[in-house]
Image: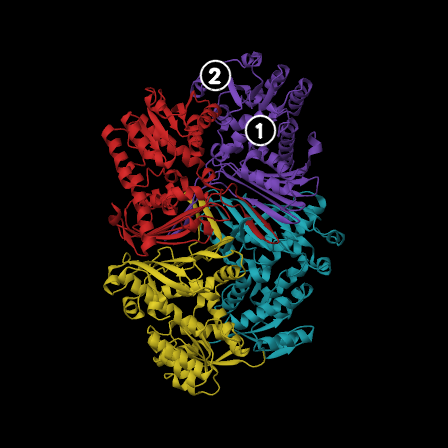
Chain colours: A purple, B cyan, C yellow, D red
Amino acid sequence: MTTKINVGIIGAGRIGRVHAENLIYRVPEARVLAVSDVFLEAAQKCAADFNIPTAVKNHQAILDNPEIEAVIICSSTDTHAQFISEAAAAGKHIFCEKPIALDLKVIDAALAAVEQHGVKLQIGFNRRFDPNFKQARDMVAAGKIGAPHLVRITSRDPAPPPLDYVKVSGGIFLDMTIHDFDMARYLIGSEVTEIFAAGAVLVDPAIGQAGDVDTAVVTLRYANGAIGTIDNSRRAVYGYDQRVEVFGSEGVVVVANNTPHNAVYSNTEGVHSALPLYFFLERYTEAYVAEMKAFILAIAQDTAPPVTGLDGRIPVVMGQAAWKSYRENRPVKLSEIGL
Amino acid sequence: MTTKINVGIIGAGRIGRVHAENLIYRVPEARVLAVSDVFLEAAQKCAADFNIPTAVKNHQAILDNPEIEAVIICSSTDTHAQFISEAAAAGKHIFCEKPIALDLKVIDAALAAVEQHGVKLQIGFNRRFDPNFKQARDMVAAGKIGAPHLVRITSRDPAPPPLDYVKVSGGIFLDMTIHDFDMARYLIGSEVTEIFAAGAVLVDPAIGQAGDVDTAVVTLRYANGAIGTIDNSRRAVYGYDQRVEVFGSEGVVVVANNTPHNAVYSNTEGVHSALPLYFFLERYTEAYVAEMKAFILAIAQDTAPPVTGLDGRIPVVMGQAAWKSYRENRPVKLSEIGL
Amino acid sequence: MTTKINVGIIGAGRIGRVHAENLIYRVPEARVLAVSDVFLEAAQKCAADFNIPTAVKNHQAILDNPEIEAVIICSSTDTHAQFISEAAAAGKHIFCEKPIALDLKVIDAALAAVEQHGVKLQIGFNRRFDPNFKQARDMVAAGKIGAPHLVRITSRDPAPPPLDYVKVSGGIFLDMTIHDFDMARYLIGSEVTEIFAAGAVLVDPAIGQAGDVDTAVVTLRYANGAIGTIDNSRRAVYGYDQRVEVFGSEGVVVVANNTPHNAVYSNTEGVHSALPLYFFLERYTEAYVAEMKAFILAIAQDTAPPVTGLDGRIPVVMGQAAWKSYRENRPVKLSEIGL
Amino acid sequence: MTTKINVGIIGAGRIGRVHAENLIYRVPEARVLAVSDVFLEAAQKCAADFNIPTAVKNHQAILDNPEIEAVIICSSTDTHAQFISEAAAAGKHIFCEKPIALDLKVIDAALAAVEQHGVKLQIGFNRRFDPNFKQARDMVAAGKIGAPHLVRITSRDPAPPPLDYVKVSGGIFLDMTIHDFDMARYLIGSEVTEIFAAGAVLVDPAIGQAGDVDTAVVTLRYANGAIGTIDNSRRAVYGYDQRVEVFGSEGVVVVANNTPHNAVYSNTEGVHSALPLYFFLERYTEAYVAEMKAFILAIAQDTAPPVTGLDGRIPVVMGQAAWKSYRENRPVKLSEIGL
């Protein structure tokens, strides 16, 4: 590749810095020209740490820069849809963290802008790029398990997010299970049509007082007849638990957790091995790199990004269906929500 | 132990023969005096194979034998409740295969007879005696995982039963999931209050035509707030898949399948290890011995058997709730059924 | 099988009792008519516990009993060879615990008696009947790993034997490694030609004072060019460690330890699983049954027993070669010892 | 860190390119100013690929550059010692690939130059930086296994090197086992005093004709009494097999291979999982980064590098002892060689 893709990063928080570092050190096909953040100091620190030429407060400067071909939107969720629309209007290709928005109308407006201006949009469902999950999905797609019958997704965080986050995030089904909803679609390649969600407050009563649940089991009915189940907890004391299983007519594929090392220690008490990698930054280190590579490659080769705007929209529908199911204690069809 | 417990076996089919062999060769504290079967040849063959002194067609001869203290009821399901009542009236202690019956009134009559005559009754939920599941339950009971939050039970058969069996068995939730319902209670020591069952016919359309499903996911709400999920398939091509997981505030315990050997073979194609033990007779060999030992010990020491009549009744309620939930596509409280 | 093989047991110590119980409860094709022990009380207790009709002090009574077709020799090692000769002269088939003797001339005399009288002799190398090792050997024999290049045997006891035993046992290479020497031959089906043994006293100085070592690594050269290595310790604090690995031109097969259960527990400290089964009685429970079945079957079907007198002799040669190698700190050919 | 360490790379072959890429993309504390290679095109391609300002044919240009503080010597083995001496004389800190040389006098001259000029020298034993082995060693150092008794190292390559390489490499004990000799020292922190090496030509007769062996088992005696064993093969068809085990008075630590993913697939044939990562570039990706970080950090903080010149010398002594042992078929003390 002779020419590099020039990129601007909007939002220099934790995940913005991850993408900045990966683009700079691990994606030689990209060049980061600018970073913006409403907290200018954050943008400046990010620029200094990673040798980014320009740091600005207002993302408009990035959109106005004719050299920049693509933007990475890592700002707060409530700005995603607006920034997508603005970037599309500016002719920039867009990588946007999930979720696009919590309101389907808002999402639809953003997706319409993307379509109207003919730019590329990739949504940040990073787990699709994890080697374990990718292997499982590739085996399913290759027919190794035959027709899928059962899907199981375990997704448990090591610790709950701050209560302030829970209050604006849309709650567990929209801030946490949303990744699993995407995984459920990714693994099988069939759409979910109906959801039944059971939830409970078992980890921290304050989460319940904030209107959320911290423990959940979701049953999924797929269009192809398969049945899926997702179990979530806001707090697994042993660390980030990220496993999937797909069972079908010809076999099963099961994905285990990743660990920092493979040393197994035996003493008089038992056989002891390493806990899973602590949280998403450790577990999905390579996945974050791979999703950036894929985005830059899609631009360079003018191909469709691997996670589309529709892939960003449907899990929001699923999250809303899950909330409705939980509140009404009945299965809810996605068509009731707006799919 | 100086005196042996004299036992009669009612029903010399596959499971009757398993109990006969175990009692004779693995439970020195028992002595099998007689076996009955409506097919006299079956009783005679069983007697010849295992050196049982008496083989009869009619179980009444066993109940009339004053030397016999206990009976093992392994006849067809539709006779269980009647034989329990008759054996209780005859003053015999009773081990009965599951289910007691499919009709709760019939069950209740049998349990009333047991109570009236003061005999012991143990139900054949053999999985409770599996070392893996027992270890998981013991860890839960010892508080190792803290308060239970999530329970996962995977239970998949290697091949569907004959269609004739499916037609009279009560269907998947009463002939197969019933074991998992018992396991769900056993692992946690808290009762299930509500069930949501999703089912599908994905293995064999003939199973659907017989009014049954062959693939199912059941969500359980426990009285203590925990949420459970059971997934079933009538056919796992890789063999009998019997796993559980209990997740709680302080940890998780996960039980894997048993295999016939631990040899791991690597060649250019991959790393290969043994499939699970094929089906229940192989997987639960030791559990069948242990449940017999426990029954005989309960008689010898005059203690309560470890699986009671109520333990036999509740999973039938759960199975009926699951069917109602599946048919009405809504969560069903066990109190709607009769708990 | 219509007629049972009548058996007498010589020696009612720990292993004699294991064989008695297995023959009586797990090998229906055998009938135990008598047990002898120089401590009459031991024979009587064994007879009472397992319903053996006759208990005697002198094994001659067993040899004189015309009804008895086979004897199981479980007496002290120094009597093995003599009892083999006497039993052969009495026309009894013989199962004898290892080692036949520590002196090759004594062994050869016993084997000559067996040959002269045309009786069957099986040596108690029980590990050949372990499902894990049998699977490894079967894979090697089936050519799954191609030509064998490397063999690794790990064999570590949970605790040292009593010092009194060490003083008469022939030391580690003849009381412990001898099993591994047999395994080395069994796995590959090629003879060992040269041995280099390194030893150390690291577990207990008293073992060294008794003239033995407690830690050893033995290198084996096979006739077919392969190289083997055995590592031994008298004390693995985590339990009985019994693993093998065979590596060849087309792959590798690795055998892991067996555990009492498959429950895996994760908490904040790590992921914890069960220790290996504690010692040989737990680990080789099924192997002891299988070797008895094989012996009885060889008699009933008049076939060659699966572990021959020569299989009993060669590991003694290997043990002596190991001691010579250790003492002279040089590789020793088996032909120097007497193979 | 405000100032970067300026580095020159000598040798732009495969491993030189790995270090170049790592220094540039993964070690922000370093800056690569120049690369040299006797094949100028290789240096130029490396410079172009990784944006290195200067590419030269003669390494002298690097040594003459006053801005360069440190050199990474990745040229052919026969130049290592000379380049170390020259770089030391030029006042450069030195990272040098193993081995320093095959001749101890040559090594000693190079180490003398390093000492005389007071520069830092780190040898490229990359496996010390592998998270698995580091964890094992850290557990040993922390006393988790008590006193070490037994060490086992398995090290098998997926495919033999070219015959031309074998002819100049010093053979298996100096080009391959040398890594395991270092690992043997690293894991235990005690020196090896005596070596017994068994070797065979089982993979390819041409290797034997070149004067080398392709299969080996080495027994190590440590100063602290422990016994070690290394097994090597030039060709493991299932990939790069890199495992270690350290057994001691209080426990054991066992390190397994790394795999590209954790997906486990079961079908009617068995349970299948991923092969080990193919070879050293895949397996030790992170270790190569970590060793560079450690070298740069040692310069920046003026501390001793973690792998010293002596650490480079001793494994060569061990390799020579192994060859002598193999050729004379007897244990050889390292003191016979020159330690």
Few, some or many residues within 10 Å of mark 1 (<14, 14–19, 20+): many
Few, some or many residues within 10 Å of mark 2 (<14, 14–19, 20+): some
| Marks 1 and 2, the one that precedes in the sequence | 2
Count of all numbered marks drawn on residues in the image: 2
Circle number at residue A39: 2
* Helix, strand or loop status at disc 2: loop
Question: Which chain contains the residue that carries disc 1?
Answer: A
In this rendering, the label closer to the viewer, 1 or 2: 1
Is B184 placed above or below A109 here? below
* Helix, strand or loop status at disc 1: helix
Q: CA distance from mark 1 to mark 2?
A: 29 Å
Is A70 placed above or below B93 here? above
Q: Nearer the viewer, residue C73 or D321?
A: D321
Question: In the image, residue A243 lies at what x, y percent?
Answer: 54, 41
Taking the image as drawn, is residue A165 in sight? yes
Question: In the image, residue A298 lies at what x, y percent?
Answer: 61, 26
Q: Nearer the viewer, residue B219 or C322?
A: C322
Q: Nearer the viewer, residue C248 or B236?
A: C248
